[in-house]
């Protein structure tokens, strides 16, 4: 059976000996999960389940950790967890969350992280769900390797909601693909549409 990429199109042949350049078949270290300290775990639970589409798959219930609300979330049953949420003990000592997320902020720590949907149709459905939940699109646009929307979670962390373009679009010049950005409308019908006329990034040598 032909190898498929995440967007459902046949994957291009990029393998050189033992080396694969695919994002879907990692041959090196990858980011496995992210644990977030949160101000209000019920608000964050709503965001990561109802808005983003993960399921809660666990909760710490060890006798030595009874004081802490620590929950695990995943996107599919073949993963143990993608995200963990941890309730901070005293939210009152922190300033309110800044939900006016933008790409270049004067702060330390997470700029944004990305949630990848398995195909374009699932991603388009998810955009509608996000809008219906009343979560604002902060940035919408097409990168050279993903089509993306950026939102803020209830603590003001940037969350990129994306689908992967076929690998053969970007693999020829990943830096050019990373530099490419076509901004798109944040509101209205246009914000929920997607163009599949993908920019091709040629091999540079
Ligand atoms: Fe990103």
Image (cartoon, grey):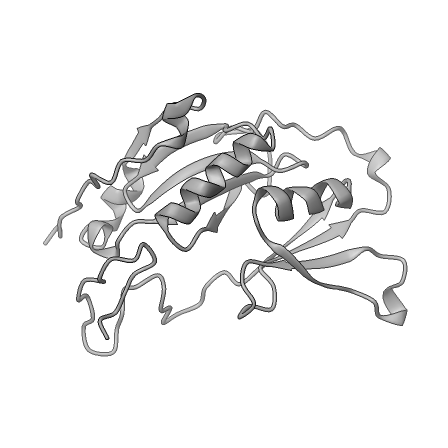
40 up-or-down from 189: above or below: below
Pick the front one: 122 or 101: 122
The quarter of the image holding the N terminus is bottom left
Q: From this viewpoint, which residue is outermost toward the bottom? A: 18
173 up-or-down from 180: above or below: below
- x%, y% of residue 4? 28, 65
- x%, y% of residue 163? 38, 48
11 up-or-down from 202: above or below: below
Please tell me how many numbered marks the rendered image carries: 0
- x%, y% of residue 93? 84, 35
Q: Is residue 92 left or right of residue 16?
A: right
Q: Is residue 111 left or right of residue 165?
A: right
Q: Is residue 55 left or right of residue 40?
A: left
Quarter of the image where one finds residue 199: top left
The quarter of the image holding the C terminus is bottom left
Quarter of the image where one finds residue 80: bottom right
185 up-or-down from 78: above or below: above
- x%, y% of residue 102? 51, 28
Q: Residue at x 80, y 46 (%)?
A: 88
Q: Residue at x 23, y 42 (%)?
A: 176
Pick the front one: 36 or 2: 2
Q: Residue at x 50, y 27 (%)?
A: 138
Q: Is residue 89 left or right of residue 15?
A: right
Q: Residue at x 38, y 46 (%)?
A: 121
Pick the front one: 1 or 163: 1
């Amino acid at each position: 059976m032909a190898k498929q990429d995440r967007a459902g199109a046949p994957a291009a042949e990029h393998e050189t000996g033992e080396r694969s350049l695919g994002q879907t078949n990692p041959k090196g270290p990858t980011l496995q999960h992210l644990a977030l300290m949160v101000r209000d775990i019920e608000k964050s639970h709503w965001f990561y389940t109802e808005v983003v589409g993960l399921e809660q798959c666990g909760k710490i219930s060890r006798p030595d950790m009874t004081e802490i609300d620590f929950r695990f979330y995943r996107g599919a049953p073949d993963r143990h967890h993608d995200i963990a949420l941890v309730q901070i003990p005293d939210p009152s000592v922190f300033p309110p969350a800044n939900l006016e997320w933008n790409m270049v902020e004067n702060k330390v720590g997470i700029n944004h992280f990305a949630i990848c949907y398995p195909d374009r149709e699932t991603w388009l459905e998810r955009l509608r769900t996000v809008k219906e939940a009343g979560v604002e699109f902060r940035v919408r646009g097409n990168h050279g390797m993903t089509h993306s929307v950026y939102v803020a979670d209830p603590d003001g962390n940037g969350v990129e909601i994306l689908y992967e373009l076929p690998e053969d679009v970007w693999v020829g010049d990943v830096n050019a693909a990373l530099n490419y950005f076509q901004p798109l409308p944040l509101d209205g019908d246009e914000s929920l549409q997607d163009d599949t006329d993908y920019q091709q990034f040629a091999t540079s040598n």
